[in-house]
Amino acid sequence: MRVAVTGASGLLGRAVMHHAPGYSLQPVAFSRSDDGSCGTVFWDADMPWTASARLLDGFDAVIHAAAYIPTEPANPDIAAKCLAVNAIGTLSLLRAAREAGVRRFVFVSGANTLSPKGSEITEDEPLGCLYSPYYLGSKAIGELYVRAAISSGTNALIVRPSSIYGPGMTKGMFVAFADALRAGRRLTVLNGGCFRADYVWRDDVAAVLCAAVLSAHTGTVNLGSGVRHSSLEVAGLVADAVGADRQLIEVEGDATPTGFSAVDISRARDWFRFEPVPLAVGLSRWFGDAAS
């Protein structure tokens, strides 16, 4: 099967390109970034849907992993671009896929679009998008368009990963923690170390996306580790992974729990035999390999 992978130069897209051949898929990178890869198709979410349809001629499936992720999620000025790329861009690609006769459409959304609660969140929780309303809100609107397409006969699946981590990340909490601890510097964890999220290994998500192309499941499926970790817990696990002393870690700020819920992964286990890599193992693979 020929599979168009949008966002193929990104953290998740690169992993999909790596895993796809193991599922007997022939992935083709659709990307606006010219990384010099042989066979990369230039594609941009701003393209007219008719132009995208011509590019998709002869493809069997689409994995739509492209997204605009803002660096200032609380800035209302980024709302328009988020909507243009993550919502309207998804609608345009859906129209293009249908016009080109693509048989399967897999859309990458996010479990953090759902309202957090004390227990695990299921696929049926209400939308929240509280912590990043412009980015997560645009992904939620993209979901609405995919669900509308499913109701009209499109063979599509919405995959909602929680917070993805892994090799290829160049900034963010994990990288900042590892850089400080490797250098033997003291690491200050803010907000009382109480920000919590469910972190899912990049390759686990990529593998499910490839399996989803071959499946007949439609609707939505959540992905995560099934466990949420605080930022203080993450700091300790990163210290272990890089061989640093946990005594370098200190906490600052009020200990008020914030963040996202753990994800109920029952459906993913049922549909894809999904068994996530625990956070400690993922961090050891990532930073342990880097250290060696």
Image: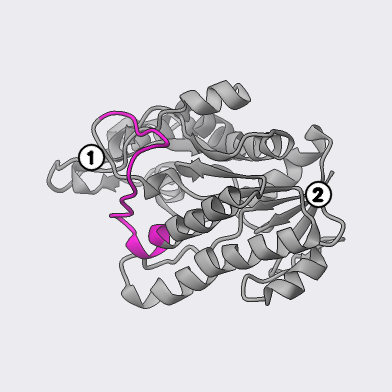
User: Residue at image x 76%, y 67%?
Assistant: 53
Magenta stretch containing residue 130, yes or no? yes
Q: Which residue of the protein is positioned furthest toward the front in this rendering?
A: 152
Looking at the picture, how far across and down is residue 100, in whole percent?
79, 61
SS label for mark 2: loop
Query: In this figure, what is the number of numbered marks?
Result: 2
Tell me the residue at 58%/62% (across/down).
90
Q: Position of residue 36 (x, y in %)?
A: 80, 65
In this rendering, the answer to whether 143 lies above or below 231 is: below
Determine whether, in the image, residue 164 is placed left or right of residue 125: right
> Which secondary structure class fits the magenta region best?
loop
Instruction: Identify the secondary structure beneath mark 1.
Output: loop
Q: Is residue 240 above or below residue 92?
A: above
Q: Which mark is residue 114?
A: none
Q: What colour scheme governs how the chains and residues are painted in the rendered image of this protein? A: one colour
Q: Say whether residue 139 is left or right of residue 95.
A: left
Question: Residue under circle 1?
Answer: 194
> Which contiguous range is marked in magenta?
119-137
* Label 2 sits on residue: 60
Which class describes the residues within 10 Å of circle 2: few (<14), some (14-19), or many (20+)? many
Confirm whether residue 274 shows in the render. no
Counting from the top left corner in percent of width and height, residue 4 is at 76, 54
Q: Is residue 121 visible?
A: yes
Identify residue type, mark 2. Asp
Quarter-of-image position of residue 204: top right
